[in-house]
């Protein structure tokens, strides 16, 4: 089965878990988009939900497909967030932010009673860190923040290159107006320590380590969908 079919299957499986009346956080990325498409079909069949999108991109797709939306200000407590991931380990710790939406994704996930991760099974790893860690930073003092991130990593034995994410020649700018630094630290033995160290840097707005947020995952592989909790 190709990657697009795996995303479609896992998107449908997640949409099947949604119940009428739910307040939903709706993630960002190609797998989350497969979920939105499957959800829109169920909405067309009469499912009543309200969704809080985690990016302008997801909001636009939901509007196109007729998925009812609200802001997190209007609906500040959610029942379930469904979102993709770049990596997940056996403790459901995640790396997210490959699509640059990690700040809103984390705010929405934290406002949700449950977070369901949807991904193809290749995203499961023994240790986080093969995927470069996205770190959202304020544009002010970016060089000072890069130096601080490098020092924070090296104090934890993590070395590697930091790259400012770009689209063509221009910096990638998030929905919140910030920049993204992709940190290729390699294997991250202690994600909690790295999370705390990054949070201590004033220029770091948020980072893509999602720790203690995911409650379950649906992983699509050639043999079907595996439910991990
Ligand atoms: C966006 C994300 C995405 O969920 C993550 O990058 C996975 O995307 P995809 O489903 O396209 O592989 O964190 O910020």
Image (cartoon, rainbow, N blue to C red):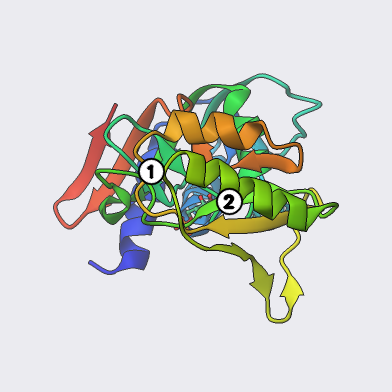
Residue 160 in the figure: left or right of residue 90 = right
Q: CA distance from mark 1 to mark 2?
A: 14 Å
- Residue at image point 72% right, 49% down: 145
In this rendering, the answer to whether 1 lies above or below 122 is below
Q: Nearer the viewer, residue 159 or 217?
A: 159
Element type at mark 2: helix
Disc 1 marks which residue?
A: 188
Q: Is residue 208 visible?
A: no
Q: Quadrant of residue 93?
A: top left
- Could you tell me which residue is drawn at 69 percent across and 37 percent down? 201
Q: Nearer the viewer, residue 63 or 96?
A: 96
Residue at mark 2 = 150
62 displayed left or right of 129: right
Residue at figure coordinates x 56%, y 52% from the top left: 134
Task: Return the residue found at the far right.
Answer: 140
Residue 30 pos. (x, y %): 49, 59
Q: Nearer the viewer, mark 1 or mark 2?
A: 2
Image quadrant of residue 27? top right
């Amino acid at each position: 089965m190709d990657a697009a079919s795996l995303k479609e299957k896992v998107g449908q499986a997640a949409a099947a878990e949604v119940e009428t009346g739910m307040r939903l956080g709706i993630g960002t990325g190609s797998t989350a988009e497969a979920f939105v498409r499957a959800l829109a079909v169920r909405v067309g069949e009469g499912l009543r939900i309200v969704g809080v999108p985690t990016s302008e991109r997801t909001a636009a797709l939901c509007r196109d497909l007729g998925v009812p939306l609200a802001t997190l200000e209007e609906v500040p407590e959610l029942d379930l967030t469904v979102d993709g991931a770049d990596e997940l380990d056996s403790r459901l710790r995640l790396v997210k932010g490959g699509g640059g939406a990690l700040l809103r994704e984390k705010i929405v996930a934290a406002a949700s009673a449950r977070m369901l991760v949807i991904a193809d099974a290749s995203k499961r790893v023994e240790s986080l860190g093969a995927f470069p860690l996205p770190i959202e930073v304020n544009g002010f003092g970016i060089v000072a923040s890069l130096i601080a991130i490098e020092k924070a990593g090296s104090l934890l034995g993590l070395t590697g290159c930091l790259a400012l994410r770009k689209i063509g020649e221009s910096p990638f700018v998030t929905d919140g107006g910030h920049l993204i630094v992709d940190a290729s630290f390699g294997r991250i033995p202690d994600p909690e320590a790295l999370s705390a160290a990054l949070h201590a840097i004033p220029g770091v707005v948020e980072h893509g380590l999602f720790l203690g947020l995911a409650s379950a995952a649906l992983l699509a592989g050639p043999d079907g969908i595996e439910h991990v909790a």
